[in-house]
Image (cartoon, rainbow, N blue to C red):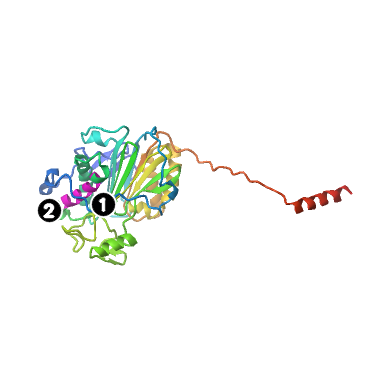
Amino acid sequence: MEESNFVKVENGSYSSDGRPPNPLASAYHQCFTASRVTASSYPTSLIRPPSLIRAKVPETSIETSMVVEECESDFTPVIRSGAWADIGNRKTMEDVYVCLDNFTRDYGLENSTDGPNAFYGLFDGHGGKHAADFACHQLPRFIAEDEDFPSEIERAISTAFLQTDAAFAEACSLNSTLASGTTALAALVIGRSLVVANAGDCRAVLSRKGKAIEMSRDHKPACSIERLRIEACGGYVYDDYLNGQVNVTRAIGDWHMEGLKDIDGGPLSAEPELMSKELIKEDEFLIIGCDGLWDVFRSQNAVDFARRRLQEHNDPVRCSKDLIEEALKRKSGDNLAVVVVCFQPHPPPNLVAPRTRVQRSVSAEGLRELQGFLDSLAT
């Protein structure tokens, strides 16, 4: 991407202030011609497979002591977001993102909760960008139109992922040129609740008082948990690739790849893994990045970097751009897309390490030696 004040998202729309486009804008809508799928084509509530259970924040995640939070009912997040994308060293751009700071208003819903109602999505396409564009447009719509939203947020999100996957399969059956796949990560902020749903290797990281808390798990063939699921579904891992074909274990699309998906399931799953937290006043911001970012950043490293930039300018758009430019300096070889969501109106505070009081004591033998030394000086 050229250095300018414009952000290009690979759907033809631009934003002069660096903000990502609204997917409801007419310039954003992709024309799928005969493959256009309406919400009425699929049930609004799918049967939830037993495997679609809300995942707890893993005990192995960074800052495990933060799994249990205190209740602070008086805290209300103040949402500010920004995003940036860059083609990187690739010939084509297949990453797509969407930022909706007022999700319910944009979709004509009544805001039934106090505080923010926001949706953020990141989609990392492979084999083309059609699946990423399709999911970026359809996933938030399926969530908004689900009868369980927002009373049962997690069920609505899980169902929407499956509906998006099924809808894209139908679209591909009508137009084979759409055949492709995409990872998908969605983050919703409803009141004080942060819910992250992930299928693939995008990652969301929460900064809580400067500590990185991973809100998603990378779905890679090397992951032992994913390998067990893959083998149970009749798949296999070869050279860190699922069935020797793709290097992720969960994705939307890829229906054209033999042996990965069928109507009864398959080793490549579109089921998202969900993690949720109640936001507290120590929560500063959320970083959502594609795998191109995490190839060159550790989670804590990204939080440290973003904190410094937000302390300088307190601008989530510039912070997103800063992260991408740093990733390019570190030789990331992939498309890059980053979304930064701030939960406070002010920049992150400086962290001061508490000074521990050191107690010093002198042994009786030391006192005798000291007294003897002082006596020798007096004689």
x and y percent of residue 116 in the render?
31, 34
Marked residue nearer the N-terminal end (1 or 2): 1
Q: Which residue is mark 2?
A: 175
Q: Residues within 10 Å of mark 2 (few under 14, many from 20)?
A: some
Q: Which residues are magenta?
A: 156-168
x and y percent of residue 314 in the render?
41, 37
Q: Which residue is mark 1?
A: 52
Q: Is residue 354 left or right of residue 297?
A: right
Q: CA distance from mark 1 to mark 2?
A: 30 Å
Q: Quadrant of residue 265?
A: bottom left
* Above or below: residue 361 compared with residue 283: below
Q: Is residue 24 visible?
A: yes
Residue plotted at (63% across, 46% down): 358
Main SS, magenta residues: helix
**Residue 265: in magenta span:** no
Residue plotted at (41% across, 42% down): 69
Q: Quadrant of residue 24?
A: top left
In the foreground, 139 or 174? 139
Count of numbered tags: 2
